[in-house]
């Protein structure tokens, strides 16, 4: 019995321990529950999101203080910090399902600001709610506008492209059509272009007229399937998609700044793009070049070599037919390998997408966004425009979106903001018909030119000289290929006949002549401005021989005579070279005309103008005549007598000319070192004149040497027809 009692006691002890353990576990659960409750109270945002995710259809909205309180909590966090992908999915479903009412639908959409990325599946589900047809039209428009705003932040777009047909079905809605066309433009690939969709767009265009947004989408369809779209469109299609999302973008920019721009500013994935320090205070929204990222999900069945995976030019050549373009075409800018690919494949759709992204960014950041001129802001904009310049110079042609932006920007530009970048971009503008040039280019430049400093005037002349060189180079390449029409942009349908090209070049040269003449008068023949002007006419004087353009245009009197009577020797030497090259070009043109080897005709007025300038230069510098009766330089003799200048007729010859006077003095001192009185007239006697000519032209005045030898038979032997070494 004792044993049994002991056994019983042994058995009863574990039972007590079990009860104690169960009680302890229960207490721990209560503590955890209480802790979780306190944590929930400390995290009102999490509680609010959970509450909103549980709102069901039919919930009373009016007077629902709890619903209002939770929406306010989420709205405050969204505007200040942005929303995570999971929260965006919850709130988008709440808004589009209308479980919280129509008014709250638009309210939620307005503060739906992502902190990082937007999940693709949330957008797909949103489109499915759109197809249900419960939402009012203003809510539908707001949803599509939101998708357009955050399009670059969508993590992937392959599933969106798979429901392309559902999205396309909304183009028949008049209020939705502009935004749906914009979204389709961003999503369209070759496989989405079908005959029935082209017919549908043409039917809508017949009802609504040639709306820009329809035209833009049809242009893209025509790029992919030119056999389906026979509709002609103007060579210069204006921007078809407007920006109505500035409020969202400002809020998104603020969130990105607070989050250190983790999505938009990161450059580490961008191929061959140098890392740039992120700005501490970003004033603009999208000036950073986006990183290269795939347009398809990594799990997609599409077999392609992603552009961001390229590491060498050899890999590019090996995979050039399987390369997939990135989700954001702007990421191609600044990447040498990406630009190599773009230049090799000449994919018109890629250029369309790139121009669309670039035009949208330039317009928003420079035309719509106010710039305060802070150092951070300016340096960031400078890097952005420099990247565009690098890309254009790499491709050896400008982007059409940059051209359109410049025409708008010139009308509001102050001439100082980002001047080097703007003028460099301006020099890349391709040729345009002459009747466009006055309104788009000449008028705004003229206003800036005459109200700015001499250094700005020099920059404008230099810019227009660079523009002319590029135009003439394009022509010479086209002429060497035997083309009748000149296509100035490989990705544009714009062509121009030779006569049209000559008209545009003539207008540009005459415009620069006007600017230079008035500028030299206003700036008292400033040496820098005069030399920039002469550099321009060094290009003009050789258009026939060097660029095969049958056109000769003489400099106006307001440029020729300030150069002839300049006080610096470089200007006089450059004028001599220019007149020497004009003679070469006109002589060859006349010879070909006499032999009937050419179909063009140089105007007799051009020959008269050249001969008049030639006579003025030879008479003043060689024959020591002070002027030519009946010429532009004729001065009343009585007025000259009042100046009491001795022997005025020889004051601009090779000895007394203000630009060459110091050389004559030096030569005189070498020849007659013992003389105390200087008699420059003795240089012209006997062998001293030939010695002086040799001494003068050995100073590097090759331009004057060529001019004198060609027109008088004197001077030292010329080595070649190269430009004078004294040029700068």
Image (tube, rainbow, N blue to C red):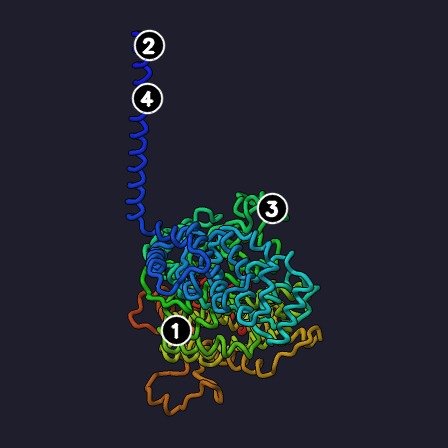
Name which of mark 1 and mark 3 comes first in the sequence: 3
* Marker disc for residue 304: 3
Name which of mark 2 and mark 3 comes first in the sequence: 2
On the image, the x and y values in percent for residue 256 come to 38, 55
Q: How many neighbours does mark 1 have within 10 angstroms: few (below 14), some (14-19), or many (20 or more)?
A: few
Name the image quarter holding residue 461: bottom left
On the image, the x and y values in percent for residue 210 come to 60, 75
**Of marks 2 and 1, the one in the foreground:** 2
Q: Secondary structure at mark 1?
A: helix
- Horizontal side of 271 relative to 115 (left or right) equals right
Name the image quarter holding residue 678: bottom left
In the displayed structure, 634 sits above or below 470; it is below
| Residue name at image x 53 percent, y 53 percent | 327
* Marker disc for residue 682: 1
* Marker disc for residue 4: 2
Name which of mark 2 and mark 1 comes first in the sequence: 2
Q: How many neighbours does mark 2 have within 10 angstroms: few (below 14), some (14-19), or many (20 or more)?
A: few
CB under 8 Å between callouts 4 and 3? no
Foreground residue among 48 and 159: 48
Give the residue number, with chain letter if any, for mark 4.
15
Could you tell me how far apart the alpha carbons at marks 2 and 3 are, in whole angstroms?
Answer: 81 Å
Foreground residue among 494 and 466: 494
Could you tell me how far apart the alpha carbons at marks 2 and 4 are, in whole angstroms?
Answer: 17 Å
**Of marks 4 and 1, the one in the foreground:** 4
CB under 8 Å between callouts 1 and 3? no
Q: Secondary structure at mark 2?
A: helix
**Of marks 2 and 3, the one in the foreground:** 2
| Residue name at image x 39 percent, y 65 percent | 247
Q: For residue 680, say whether it is visible.
A: no
Name which of mark 2 and mark 4 comes first in the sequence: 2
């Amino acid at each position: 019995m004792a044993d049994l009692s002991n056994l019983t006691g042994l058995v009863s002890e574990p039972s007590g321990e079990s009860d104690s353990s169960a009680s302890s576990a229960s207490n721990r659960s209560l503590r955890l529950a209480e802790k979780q409750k306190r944590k929930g109270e400390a995290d009102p945002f999490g509680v609010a999101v959970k509450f909103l995710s549980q709102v069901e259809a039919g919930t009373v909205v009016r007077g629902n203080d709890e619903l209002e309180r939770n929406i306010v909590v989420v709205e405050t966090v969204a505007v200040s910090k942005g929303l995570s992908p999971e929260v965006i999915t919850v709130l988008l479903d709440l808004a589009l399902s209308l479980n919280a009412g129509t008014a709250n639908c638009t309210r939620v959409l307005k503060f739906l600001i992502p902190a990082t990325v937007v999940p693709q599946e949330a957008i797909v589900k949103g489109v499915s709610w759109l197809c249900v047809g419960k939402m009012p039209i203003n809510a539908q428009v707001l949803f599509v506008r939101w998708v357009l705003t955050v399009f670059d932040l969508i993590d992937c777009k392959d599933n969106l492209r798979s429901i392309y047909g559902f999205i396309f079905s909304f183009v028949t809605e008049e209020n939705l059509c502009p935004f749906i066309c914009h979204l389709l433009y961003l999503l369209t690939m070759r496989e989405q272009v079908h005959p029935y969709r082209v017919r549908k767009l043409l039917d809508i265009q017949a009802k609504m007229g040639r709306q820009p947004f329809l035209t833009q989408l049809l242009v893209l369809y025509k790029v992919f399937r030119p056999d389906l779209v026979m509709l002609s469109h103007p060579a210069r299609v204006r921007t078809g998609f407007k920006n109505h999302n500035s409020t969202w973008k400002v809020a998104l920019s603020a969130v990105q700044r607070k989050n250190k721009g983790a999505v938009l500013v990161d450059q580490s994935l961008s191929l061959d793009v140098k890392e740039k320090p992120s700005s501490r205070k970003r004033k603009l929204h999208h000036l950073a070049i986006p990183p290269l990222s795939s347009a398809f999900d990594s799990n997609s069945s599409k077999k392609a070599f992603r552009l961001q995976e390229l590491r060498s030019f050899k890999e590019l050549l090996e995979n050039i037919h399987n390369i997939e373009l990135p989700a954001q075409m702007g990421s191609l800018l600044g990447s040498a390998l990406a630009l190599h690919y773009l230049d090799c494949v000449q994919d018109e759709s890629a250029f369309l997408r790139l121009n669309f992204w670039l035009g949208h960014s330039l317009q928003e950041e420079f035309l719509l966004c106010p710039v305060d001129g802070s150092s951070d802001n300016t340096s960031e904009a400078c890097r952005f425009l420099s990247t565009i310049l690098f890309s254009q110079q790499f491709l050896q042609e400008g982007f059409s979106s940059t051209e359109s932006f410049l025409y708008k920007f010139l009308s509001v530009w102050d001439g100082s903001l980002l001047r080097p970048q703007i003028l460099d971009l301006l020099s890349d503008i391709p040729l345009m018909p002459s009747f466009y040039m006055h309104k788009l280019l000449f008028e705004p430049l003229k206003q800036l030119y005459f109200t700015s400093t001499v250094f700005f005037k020099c920059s404008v002349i230099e810019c227009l000289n660079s523009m002319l060189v590029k135009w003439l180079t394009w022509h010479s390449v086209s002429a060497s290929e035997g083309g009748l029409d000149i296509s100035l942009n490989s990705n544009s349908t714009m062509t121009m006949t030779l006569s049209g090209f000559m008209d545009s070049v003539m207008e540009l040269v005459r415009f620069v002549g006007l600017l230079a003449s008035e500028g030299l008068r206003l700036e008292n023949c400033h040496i820098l401005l005069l030399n920039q002007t002469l550099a321009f006419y060094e290009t003009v004087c050789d258009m026939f021989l060097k660029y095969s353009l049958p056109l000769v245009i003489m400099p106006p009197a307001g440029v020729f005579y300030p150069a002839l009577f300049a006080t610096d020797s470089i200007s006089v030497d450059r004028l001599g070279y220019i007149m020497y090259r004009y003679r070469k070009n006109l002589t060859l043109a006349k010879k070909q005309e006499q032999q009937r080897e050419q179909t063009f005709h140089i105007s007799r007025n051009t020959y008269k103008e050249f001969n008049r300038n030639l006579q003025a230069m030879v008479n003043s510098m060689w024959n020591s005549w002070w002027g030519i009766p009946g010429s532009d330089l004729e001065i009343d003799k009585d007025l000259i007598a009042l100046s009491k200048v001795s022997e005025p007729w020889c004051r601009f010859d090779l000895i007394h000319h203000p630009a060459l006077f110091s050389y004559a003095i030096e030569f005189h001192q070498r020849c007659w070192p013992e003389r105390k009185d200087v008699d420059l007239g003795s240089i012209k006697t006997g062998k001293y004149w030939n010695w002086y000519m040799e001494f003068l032209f050995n100073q590097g005045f090759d331009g004057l040497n060529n001019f004198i030898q060609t027109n008088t038979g004197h001077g030292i032997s010329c080595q070649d027809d190269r430009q004078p070494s004294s040029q700068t």
